[in-house]
Amino acid sequence: MATHRLYYDDCFLQNFTARVVSCLPAEPFPTPSGTRPAWEVLLDRTALYPNSGGQPHDLGKLGEGQILDVRDDGDEIAHIVDREISGGTIDGCIDWPRRFDHMQQHTGQHLLSAIFQERYGLPTVSFHLGSELSTIDLRGPEPSPDTLTGAQRAANAVIFEDRPVNVRYGTADQLAQRGVRKEVDRQGILRAIEIEATDLQPCGGTHVKSAGQIGLILVRRCTKIRQDWRVEFACGARAEKFASADFELLRLIATRLSCTPDEAPAAIEKSAAERDSSSKNLRLALEQLAEARSKLLIAGTAPAANQLRCIATLLREEDAELLLPLASELARNENTVALLIHEPSGQLVFAQSMAAAADLGAILKQVLATIPGKGGGTRDFVRAKLADPSQSAAALKLATQLIAG
């Protein structure tokens, strides 16, 4: 028996009465708190929308039963509830704030997709209504920032005009004659959503009655997804939430930069340039420090009987960034092995001159087999980080013994 879909004709219907056709045990339903017993209920009619066309299902109640899921099974709609439902008639209700939010996002998607296609030649190939943001995937050249802004402004202009949103019925040929945005190859009478003078699109989803009820469209960003371009957007209360959060973030950034929000972009550019300059100066200073420290360490470490000079050092006060330039500088010296560990962080770098005979990769494996950590490298150069920095001295002692052995 086909389920009569009440939302096709009245998306604003929040309460309804229906006859229970059947109620059967269903597979346990997964929830964040664990699986729950579930029953599948078929009704002769329903106002609850199922998962379909990128729009999530409704939540609500059937009698005292909580709706867990609503599924489209062809002609029938299956309601998954958390308890067994008795036969006869039953009252149902919809989680209205959730439904209206979905109606805003879905109608906003129709409007935004129409603008992208008609003005910029970018058709929508898929749509997803998420819990925070919604997305449309556009096919064609990459939308420029001006395109994204232009589409947002054009869509909001339609919203501010509060153009009517109507449900139309007709065959595929009849809808094609009316200028449907995307033709479909289906027989029989089709349902389409019309935003007056803007869009006509076959759709079985739920929508607002006029564009003004969308509230506002906010386009967030655009990213490459395989051969398409994914545009993130939010409508209505979601748009207000994101806009407020964005401005609060901008205000906090401006406060930290001691400027006004309008001055923040220029202040960020200046800060980034100063950071790059400071990083360059720091690298130069570390290289100079490494050269000076290397000379001192070489002068203070006598070669062993086999002429191998092993320099094993714990860095305590220095920055961990000194490890690499210092190890590289020490390894420039003939027959020299540098074993350096930054004690506060447990980071280590072992390096040696090409003429040295040690296998640092093998030595690191032996060290990490005794003192846990992660890392790797080659025969002449390895890097790693100990799981427990307090074991730095023990790791250095073991590595030194392995070199001597």
Image (tube, helix red, strand yellow):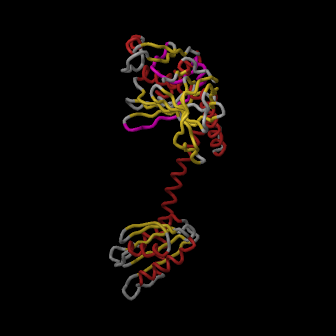
Using the image as rendered, state which of residue 270 and residue 103 is in the foreground: 103
Q: Quadrant of residue 100?
A: top right
Query: Which corner quadrant holds the C terminus?
Result: bottom left
The image shows residue 330, relative to residue 24, as above or below, that is: below
Tell me if residue 202 is in the magenta stretch. Answer: yes
In the rendered image, the residue lying farthest to the left is 355
The image shows residue 25, relative to residue 206, as above or below, that is: below
The residue depicted at 45 percent of the width and 74 percent of the height is: 369
Using the image as rendered, state which of residue 1 and residue 117 is in the foreground: 1
Tell me if residue 205 is in the magenta stretch. Answer: yes
In the rendered image, the residue lying farthest to the front is 87
Using the image as rendered, state which of residue 344 and residue 265 is in the foreground: 344
Residue 36 can be seen in this image: yes
Residue 150 can be seen in this image: no
The image shows residue 169, relative to residue 329, as above or below, that is: above
Residue 391 position within the rendered picture, expressed as x and y whole percent measured from the top left: 55, 74
Q: Is residue 360 left or right of residue 70?
A: left
Residue 375 position within the rendered picture, expressed as x and y whole percent measured from the top left: 44, 66
The residue depicted at 40 percent of the width and 23 percent of the height is: 121
Residue 357 position within the rendered picture, expressed as x and y whole percent measured from the top left: 34, 78
Residue 112 position within the rendered picture, expressed as x and y whole percent measured from the top left: 49, 24
Magenta-colored span: 197-226
The image shows residue 366, relative to residue 53, as above or below, that is: below
Question: How many numbered tags mark residues here?
Answer: 0
The residue depicted at 49 percent of the width and 33 percent of the height is: 128
Q: Quadrant of residue 158?
A: top right
